[in-house]
Image (cartoon, rainbow, N blue to C red):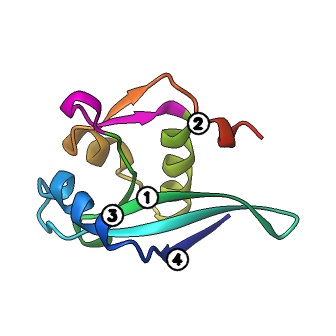
């Protein structure tokens, strides 16, 4: 896995700030999490560093105004965040951002 490549899509940063405002630092940045297979890019997920980079969170969807994230996507980003920190506070940030894990799976994570 490779993490830390900033996305070039400015729309994502605007959307990110909307659901990231509940933190001490309201700024967030979108990052790519690349899943490699034999050194080649197999899949790419977009996540957000929130609260000035204190936590990596999965990018939510907002059907009907509820911020939801597929369970497989949550697991991937939780893993990446835990690998980047001595003590991950993923669960606390996930709740504070009012994100909701749903049982739907992302097809590309089932390689």
Give above or below for 71 relative to 60: above
Which one is nearer the viewer's eye here, 49 or 42? Answer: 42
Q: Which mark is residue 106?
A: 2
* Residue 30: image location, x then y, percent: 38, 67
Q: From mark 4 to mark 1, how far is it between C-alphas?
A: 10 Å
Q: Is residue 19 left or right of residue 83?
A: left
> Mark 1 or mark 3: which comes first in sequence?
3
**Residue visible at 46% across and 63% down in the picture:** 86
Magenta segment, which residues? 62-71
Q: Marks 2 and 4: in contact by CB < 8 Å?
A: no
Q: Which residue is mark 3?
A: 12
Helix, strand, or loop for circle 2?
Answer: loop
Q: From mark 3 to mark 2, how far is it between C-alphas?
A: 19 Å
Q: Marks 1 and 2: in contact by CB < 8 Å?
A: no
- Visible residue check, residue 54: no
**Residue visible at 51% across and 25% down in the picture:** 104
Q: From mark 4 to mark 2, how far is it between C-alphas?
A: 21 Å
Helix, strand, or loop for circle 1?
Answer: strand
> Mark 4 or mark 2: which comes first in sequence?
4
Q: Which mark is residue 96?
A: none
Q: From mark 4 to mark 3, how far is it between C-alphas?
A: 14 Å
Q: Marks 2 and 3: in contact by CB < 8 Å?
A: no
Helix, strand, or loop for circle 4?
Answer: strand
Q: Which residue is mark 4?
A: 5
């Amino acid at each position: 896995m490779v993490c830390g490549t900033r996305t070039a899509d400015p729309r994502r940063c605007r959307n990110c700030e909307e659901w990231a405002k509940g933190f001490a630092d309201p700024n967030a940045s979108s990052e790519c999490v690349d899943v490699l297979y034999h050194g080649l890019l197999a899949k790419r997920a977009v996540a957000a560093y929130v609260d000035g980079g204190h936590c990596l969170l999965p990018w939510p969807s907002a059907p009907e105004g509820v911020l939801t994230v597929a369970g497989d996507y949550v697991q991937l980003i939780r893993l990446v965040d835990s690998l980047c920190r001595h003590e991950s506070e993923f669960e606390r940030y996930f709740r504070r951002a009012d994100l909701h894990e749903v049982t739907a799976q992302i097809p590309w994570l089932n390689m």
